[in-house]
Protein backbone atom coordinates (compact mmCIF):
# COMPACT_ATOMS: atom_id res chain seq x y z
CA UNK A 1 0.00 0.00 0.00
CA UNK A 2 1.35 3.43 -0.97
CA UNK A 3 1.09 6.19 1.60
CA UNK A 4 0.00 9.45 0.12
CA UNK A 5 0.35 12.99 1.26
CA UNK A 6 -2.72 14.83 -0.04
CA UNK A 7 -1.13 18.26 0.40
CA UNK A 8 2.17 17.37 -1.23
CA UNK A 9 0.59 15.23 -3.92
CA UNK A 10 -1.95 17.90 -4.86
CA UNK A 11 0.67 20.64 -5.04
CA UNK A 12 2.87 18.40 -7.17
CA UNK A 13 0.01 17.70 -9.58
CA UNK A 14 -0.75 21.42 -9.77
CA UNK A 15 2.93 22.16 -10.43
CA UNK A 16 3.12 19.55 -13.21
CA UNK A 17 0.01 21.01 -14.85
CA UNK A 18 1.41 24.55 -14.55
CA UNK A 19 4.72 23.54 -16.14
CA UNK A 20 2.95 21.78 -19.00
CA UNK A 21 0.77 24.84 -19.67
CA UNK A 22 3.31 27.59 -19.01
CA UNK A 23 1.41 28.79 -15.96
CA UNK A 24 2.83 30.10 -12.71
CA UNK A 25 1.91 28.98 -9.21
CA UNK A 26 1.69 30.96 -5.99
CA UNK A 27 1.63 28.58 -3.04
CA UNK A 28 1.22 29.38 0.66
CA UNK A 29 3.21 27.48 3.22
CA UNK A 30 3.98 28.04 6.88
CA UNK A 31 6.64 28.59 9.50
CA UNK A 32 5.73 25.12 10.79
CA UNK A 33 8.27 23.73 8.29
CA UNK A 34 10.80 24.65 11.02
CA UNK A 35 11.12 23.11 14.46
CA UNK A 36 10.69 26.38 16.35
CA UNK A 37 13.99 26.19 18.20
CA UNK A 38 15.67 29.22 16.62
CA UNK A 39 16.36 32.27 18.76
CA UNK A 40 16.04 34.61 15.78
CA UNK A 41 13.57 34.90 12.91
CA UNK A 42 14.00 32.13 10.37
CA UNK A 43 15.47 32.90 6.96
CA UNK A 44 14.42 31.32 3.70
CA UNK A 45 17.81 29.60 3.53
CA UNK A 46 17.57 27.96 6.97
CA UNK A 47 17.29 24.18 7.08
CA UNK A 48 13.75 22.95 7.53
CA UNK A 49 12.85 20.45 10.22
CA UNK A 50 9.10 20.15 10.76
CA UNK A 51 8.00 18.43 13.96
CA UNK A 52 4.27 18.12 13.22
CA UNK A 53 2.26 16.34 10.56
CA UNK A 54 1.02 19.73 9.39
CA UNK A 55 4.57 21.03 8.97
CA UNK A 56 5.67 17.88 7.17
CA UNK A 57 2.76 18.03 4.71
CA UNK A 58 3.39 21.71 4.00
CA UNK A 59 7.08 21.00 3.38
CA UNK A 60 6.16 18.09 1.11
CA UNK A 61 4.03 20.51 -0.90
CA UNK A 62 6.92 22.97 -1.19
CA UNK A 63 9.27 20.24 -2.39
CA UNK A 64 6.72 18.82 -4.86
CA UNK A 65 6.14 22.26 -6.37
CA UNK A 66 9.85 23.02 -6.63
CA UNK A 67 10.56 19.62 -8.17
CA UNK A 68 7.73 20.02 -10.71
CA UNK A 69 9.79 22.56 -12.62
CA UNK A 70 6.89 25.03 -12.75
CA UNK A 71 7.49 28.74 -12.31
CA UNK A 72 6.46 29.33 -8.73
CA UNK A 73 6.55 31.42 -5.61
CA UNK A 74 6.15 29.86 -2.21
CA UNK A 75 5.13 32.29 0.53
CA UNK A 76 5.71 31.05 4.06
CA UNK A 77 3.30 32.85 6.35
CA UNK A 78 2.93 32.85 10.13
CA UNK A 79 0.52 33.98 12.82
CA UNK A 80 -2.06 35.11 10.23
CA UNK A 81 -5.04 37.05 11.57
CA UNK A 82 -8.06 38.86 10.18
CA UNK A 83 -11.39 40.25 11.32
CA UNK A 84 -13.10 37.18 9.85
CA UNK A 85 -12.47 33.46 9.95
CA UNK A 86 -10.88 31.38 12.66
CA UNK A 87 -7.69 32.89 13.99
CA UNK A 88 -6.01 34.05 17.21
CA UNK A 89 -7.44 37.58 17.06
CA UNK A 90 -11.04 36.36 16.82
CA UNK A 91 -10.47 33.68 19.46
CA UNK A 92 -9.09 36.21 21.95
CA UNK A 93 -11.97 38.62 21.33
CA UNK A 94 -14.50 35.82 21.83
CA UNK A 95 -12.85 34.53 24.99
CA UNK A 96 -12.46 38.06 26.34
CA UNK A 97 -16.17 38.70 25.81
CA UNK A 98 -16.95 35.59 27.85
CA UNK A 99 -15.23 37.30 30.77
CA UNK A 100 -13.07 34.42 31.92
CA UNK A 101 -9.46 34.90 32.95
CA UNK A 102 -7.22 34.07 30.03
CA UNK A 103 -3.90 32.27 30.18
CA UNK A 104 -1.78 32.76 27.09
CA UNK A 105 1.71 31.37 26.55
CA UNK A 106 4.57 33.83 26.63
CA UNK A 107 7.40 31.59 25.41
CA UNK A 108 6.59 31.43 21.69
CA UNK A 109 7.75 34.36 19.58
CA UNK A 110 6.48 35.31 16.15
CA UNK A 111 5.24 38.08 13.90
CA UNK A 112 1.46 38.52 13.84
CA UNK A 113 0.66 39.01 10.16
CA UNK A 114 -2.58 40.52 8.85
CA UNK A 115 -4.22 38.52 6.08
CA UNK A 116 -4.65 41.81 4.24
CA UNK A 117 -0.85 42.19 3.98
CA UNK A 118 -0.58 38.73 2.46
CA UNK A 119 -3.34 39.51 -0.05
CA UNK A 120 -1.81 42.87 -1.01
CA UNK A 121 1.70 41.50 -1.50
CA UNK A 122 0.34 38.55 -3.49
CA UNK A 123 -1.62 40.92 -5.76
CA UNK A 124 1.49 43.06 -6.33
CA UNK A 125 3.62 40.05 -7.20
CA UNK A 126 1.02 38.66 -9.59
CA UNK A 127 0.75 42.06 -11.28
CA UNK A 128 4.53 42.17 -11.71
CA UNK A 129 4.54 38.63 -13.07
CA UNK A 130 1.71 39.48 -15.49
CA UNK A 131 3.42 42.60 -16.78
CA UNK A 132 6.89 41.04 -16.81
CA UNK A 133 8.16 44.48 -15.72
CA UNK A 134 10.21 43.10 -12.89
CA UNK A 135 9.71 39.38 -12.97
CA UNK A 136 9.54 37.80 -9.57
CA UNK A 137 12.25 35.27 -8.93
CA UNK A 138 10.95 31.78 -8.38
CA UNK A 139 11.51 30.34 -4.94
CA UNK A 140 10.59 30.56 -1.29
CA UNK A 141 9.89 33.84 0.49
CA UNK A 142 8.85 34.50 4.06
CA UNK A 143 5.80 36.74 3.98
CA UNK A 144 5.26 37.99 7.51
CA UNK A 145 4.85 41.38 9.13
CA UNK A 146 7.85 43.11 10.66
CA UNK A 147 8.45 43.02 14.38
CA UNK A 148 7.84 40.24 16.83
CA UNK A 149 5.97 39.44 20.01
CA UNK A 150 4.79 36.49 22.05
CA UNK A 151 1.26 35.08 21.94
CA UNK A 152 0.74 36.76 25.31
CA UNK A 153 2.01 40.09 23.97
CA UNK A 154 -0.27 39.74 20.96
CA UNK A 155 -3.24 39.04 23.25
CA UNK A 156 -2.43 42.13 25.34
CA UNK A 157 -2.27 44.28 22.20
CA UNK A 158 -5.61 42.90 21.03
CA UNK A 159 -7.33 43.82 24.30
CA UNK A 160 -5.68 47.24 24.45
CA UNK A 161 -7.12 48.08 21.02
CA UNK A 162 -10.50 46.37 21.49
Image (tube, rainbow, N blue to C red):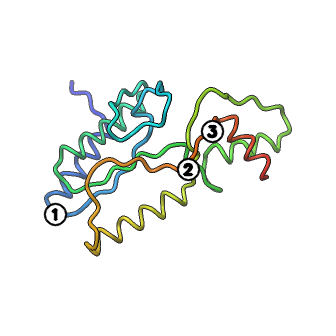
Q: Residues within 10 Å of mark 3 (few under 14, many from 20)?
A: some
Q: What residue is shown at x 52% (from left), y 59% (from top)?
A: 117
Distance from the alpha carbon under mark 1 to that under mark 2 = 33 Å
- Where on the picture, by quarter, is residue 123? bottom left
Query: Mark 3 and mark 1 in contact (Cβ < 8 Å)?
Result: no
Q: Counting other residues with Cα less than 10 Å from the Cα at mark 2, is it few (<14), some (14-19), or many (20 or more)?
A: many
Q: Is residue 84 above or below residue 105?
A: below
In depth, the one of 59 and 48 nearer the eye is 48
Give the mark, 1 or 2, whose residue is nearer the N terminus: 1
Name the residue at 75% across, 28% down: 103
* Disc 3, SS: strand
Q: Whole-percent x and y of residue 77?
A: 46, 46
Distance of label 2 from label 3 (alpha carbons) = 11 Å
**Residue at label 1?**
21
* Residue for badge 2: 113
> Could you classify mark 1 by the number of other residues whose Cα lies within 10 Å: few (under 14), some (14-19), or many (20 or more)?
few
Q: Which residue was labeled with disc 3?
A: 149
Amino acid sequence: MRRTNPSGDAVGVLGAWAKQHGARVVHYSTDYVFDGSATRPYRETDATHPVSVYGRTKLAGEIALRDSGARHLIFRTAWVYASRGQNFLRTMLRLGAEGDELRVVDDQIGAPTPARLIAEVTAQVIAQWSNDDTPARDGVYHLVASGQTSWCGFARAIFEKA
